[in-house]
Image (cartoon, rainbow, N blue to C red):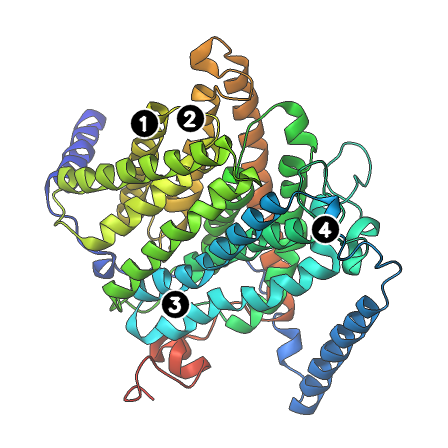
Amino acid sequence: EQFGTILSAVELLLRHLSAPTATPTSHPRGKMIELYPSFLPSGVLEKPAPWIKKCMIAFVAVCIFGIAVAMCVAPDDSNLLVSELTDPSATMWTIISSALVLIMTPGLAFFYGGMVSKKNMIATMAAVLINMAVIPVMWSIIGFSLAFGESAGYPDMIGTPRTYGIFYNVDSTEFSDFGVPITAFWIFQGMFAILTPAILVGSIADRVNIASLFLFVPMWHMAVYCPVAFMVFNGGLISQYGVVDFAGGMVVHMSSGWSALAAAFFLGSRKAASDGPASVPYTILGAALLWFGWFGFNAGSALAGSPTAGLAFANTIIATSTGMLAWILMDQLYGRPFKVTGIAFGIVCGLVGITPACASVNYGAAAIIGIVAAMASSIVQWFMHWIGFLVVDDTLDVFAAHGVAGTAGMIMTSLFQYYGVPDGAFYGNPIELGRCMITLVALVGYFLVATLILMFLTNFFITMRVSEEEEEEGLDMSKHWEGPTADAE
């Protein structure tokens, strides 16, 4: 009898693989998983009278204004415009790369906005774009210092706010022998910080209360992004351990992707079936902007117009192309129609996969990384849609595209790394694979647990999920009172 049950399960699996794959809209919606205890209050900041809410908003505005005034009183600005302290060409390359990375966030807004339900397009784009308002303020006040300040102490897991807090010491002096001024480095890394939580929100689109993101995003930035950035980019614990991540496979994509999985699990499945994609051209425009900006993301991380930047640029093109082709072939194996949205996903998976390895592998390895990242993401996406859908409803497959592809990219880096770093496992140094796997296991656990805790805290103060009525009506009208067209309003 047990053998017959196993055969039936295998037959069902093969049937799903051979038959054309249904779109996620055909799946029944599951009930929200009640992770938040019913005996705890939720949304305590939403319950006071309107005048009290306005007073709280005014208090926050006054605090931000006071911090801005404090920034005006610089202890020492004598080095603010001293160009002789740094390399002008490296500075210019870093600034241009910063602009390229910044365009990725609006590109992500188009990418996500085009894929969600038509009644949630504006809300989803807004959830991405608010990171361009929240994160620069946090980055100025404390984030940059937590990520790139002097170590707060052993075991070198986070920086101290005393180094660069409220723009203290952010001037034209050279940052850590990189040849660029601290101001330019602040700008460049700040663009990474903006993009990372913007990626995360795609997993909870169609049902997240945008007001809650104004609390959740700053907390996640300080508790998750900044410590990992310090440990990887600023000579912290992970860097000392010898794990290679050139441009942010762990810092940006694994952190946002695995946190997206936890966030989607916390909020539960959508109640309303999606009528998306809202606009395939928007998604393609977003993918194009992401690919364009990613050259600043990867090649810009060299912080100079150097051969390293050239290698990173070339590997980015190769891996993205093979990732796109791999996704197309996987769709054909599943029996899916040839979809342009699949091309867009393949682009993103290839870009994510090559990010940690772009400056340390050869061209053949870059091609393989793009293929493996896209294939792994495609398989996980299929699994999430057919089996895990009622447990984790990742609206825009953020976990598959960033968590899985980023993890695959890190593992492949430890296998193929060769240039300017310790040789990888395929070059006679298997210890690199072991170090990488230990680090990834530790980080994944941290991302999941930290995000769930922050979701609990946020939900206590501001309810993170909209009501069923608001979800049914659509967040564009219920939360923003506007739609993508004049007729929608």
Which residue, as the protein is rendered here, is positioned at the far right? Answer: 75
User: For the residue labelled by badge 2, is the local secondary structure a helix, a strand or a loop?
Assistant: helix
The mark that comes first in sequence, 1 or 3, is 3
The mark that comes first in sequence, 4 or 3, is 4
The span from disc 1 to disc 3 (Cα, nearest Å) is 35 Å
Q: Which of marks 1 and 4 is in front?
A: 4
The span from disc 4 to disc 3 (Cα, nearest Å) is 48 Å
Determine which of the numbered discs, if any, sits on residue 83 in the image: 4
The mark that comes first in sequence, 2 or 1, is 1
Which residue has dot 2 on it? 412
Which residue has dot 1 on it? 368
Which residue has dot 3 on it? 206
User: For the residue labelled by badge 1, is the local secondary structure a helix, a strand or a loop?
Assistant: helix
Q: Is residue 14 left or right of residue 347?
A: left
Q: Is residue 295 left or right of residue 224?
A: left
The span from disc 4 to disc 2 (Cα, nearest Å) is 40 Å
Residue at position x 46%, y 71% in the image = 126
Where residue 407 sits in the image (x, y, percent)?
45, 35
Between 117 and 196, the one lying in front of the other is: 196
Quadrant housing residue 219: bottom right
Q: Do the residues labelled 4 and 2 touch (CB within 8 Å)?
A: no
Q: In which quarter of the image is the N terminus?
A: top left
Q: Do the residues labelled 1 and 3 touch (CB within 8 Å)?
A: no
Q: Quick one: label 4, few (<14), some, or many (20+) residues within 10 Å? A: some
